[in-house]
Amino acid sequence: MARMGGRRHLKALAAPAFWPILRKEYKWTVKPRPGPHPMERSLPLLLIVRDVLGYAKTAREARKLIAEGNFKIDGVVRRDYKFPVSFMDVIEVVKTGELYRFLPYPVKFFKLELIPREEATIKPLRIENKTTVKGGHIQLNLYDGRNVLVKVKDPRNPVEDVYDVGGTLIVTIPSMEIKGYISFDIGRIALVVGGKAVGRVGRIKSITWGWRKETTVVTLEDPRGNLFQTSLNYIYIIGVDKPIIKLPEGAWP
C-alpha cells in the first residue's frame, strides 16, 4: 500500500518549499502529472483550488470541482487535478469570471495576480531554443513546453525568422497566434523567475557573459534605482518601455 502511495503521490516533506501545504500534518500530497512545467517551479491545480484560492476545504472537494470543469488554464478547461500550473499561466474561475496570472513573487516564490479580462488573452513566453525543421521552417520551443512554427518562404534567406533565444514571444491563448516579440537586450524590462531575487523586476543594465547561461550574470536596476544581479537562466523579458502584463503592486510604477 505504501509503495502505491509513493507512485501516485508525493511525500509532503519532499515537495518544493514554496508549496502551501501542511507538511507536519500530512505525510502525502498530490504529485503533479508530467506536463509543460517541472515540479520545481509549478503547483498542481488541486493545491491552487484548495490551498491558494480556497474554493475547497478537502482534496476530495477540490477534485470534484476540477472534474466538473470549473477551472481553465490558458483558456482550456482542465479536469486533471494533477495538472501543473506555473509562471505566466492564466487561471480562470469559470463561474465567477475571476482571472489570475501565476507570477513569481519575492521570498514566497509565487503569487496569483488578479488580471483584467483583456489581458487574459495574451501570454508572454520566453524562447528557450529554436530549431530548423523540414522545409527550412523555424520551430520555437517555448517556456511552457509548447512549440510555435514560423514558416519561411525561402530557407536560404529566412527573413521571417526575427526571433532569438532568450527573447519573449507574445502569443494569444489558447490559439497560440503570434502577436508580438520582445528581444533580449540591454534596457529591456525583465522579471526574475528563480534564485534569491525571484519576483524582482528591473531594467537590464549590463550582462557579464560566462561559459553557460548559468554562469552569465545579468545586472538590473529596479524602479527605486537599486542594482541587483541574477543568473541569465532566471531572466524573463516582459517589456521595453513598460511591462506588458499586470504585476503585483509595487513591482513597477
Image: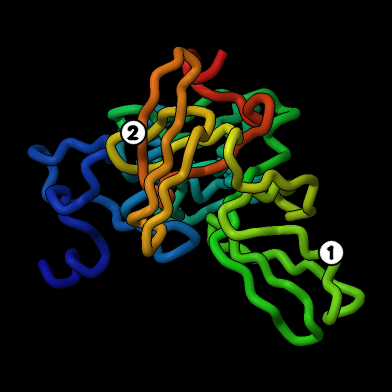
Placement of 6 over or under 40, stated as above or below = below
Q: Seen in the image, is 146 located left or right of residue 231?
A: right
In front here: 10 or 147? 147
Q: Which residue is mark 2?
A: 197
Is residue 43 visible to us here? no
At a point 59% along the width and 59% down the height, the residue shown is 165
Mark 1–mark 2 Cα distance, whole angstroms, equals: 35 Å
Q: Is residue 231 left or right of residue 176?
A: left
Q: Looking at numbered disc 2 in the image, what kind of residue is underneath it?
A: Ala
Image quadrant in which you'd find residue 147: bottom right
Using the rendered view, name the quadrant where residue 238 is placed. top right
How dense is the environment of label 2, judged by Cα within 10 Å: few (below 14), some, or many (20 and up)?
Answer: many
The numbered mark, 1 or 2, whose residue comes first in the sequence reads 1
Q: Which secondary structure lies at badge 1?
A: loop
Residue 245, percent from left and from top: 63, 30
In the displayed structure image, the side of residue 69 where residue 200 appears, left or right:
left
Looking at the picture, which amino acid does disc 1 mark?
Glu
Q: Position of residue 188 (x, y in %)?
A: 60, 35
Tell me what residue is drawn at x 58 percent, y 39 percent.
186
Which of 232/113 is in front?
A: 232
Q: Residue visible at 51% across and 26% down?
A: 113
Q: Which of 84/131 is in front?
A: 131
**Residue 80's spot in the image, x, y percent?**
47, 56
- Residue 121 makes an appearance in the image: yes
Please tell me whether residue 118 is drawn above or below residue 49 in the rendered image.
above
Q: Which mark is residue 242?
A: none
* In the image, farthest residue toward the bottom: 134
The numbered disc on residue 160 is: 1
Q: Is disc 1 surrounded by few (<14), some (14 to 19) or many (20+) residues within 10 Å?
A: some
Q: Residue furthest left?
A: 24
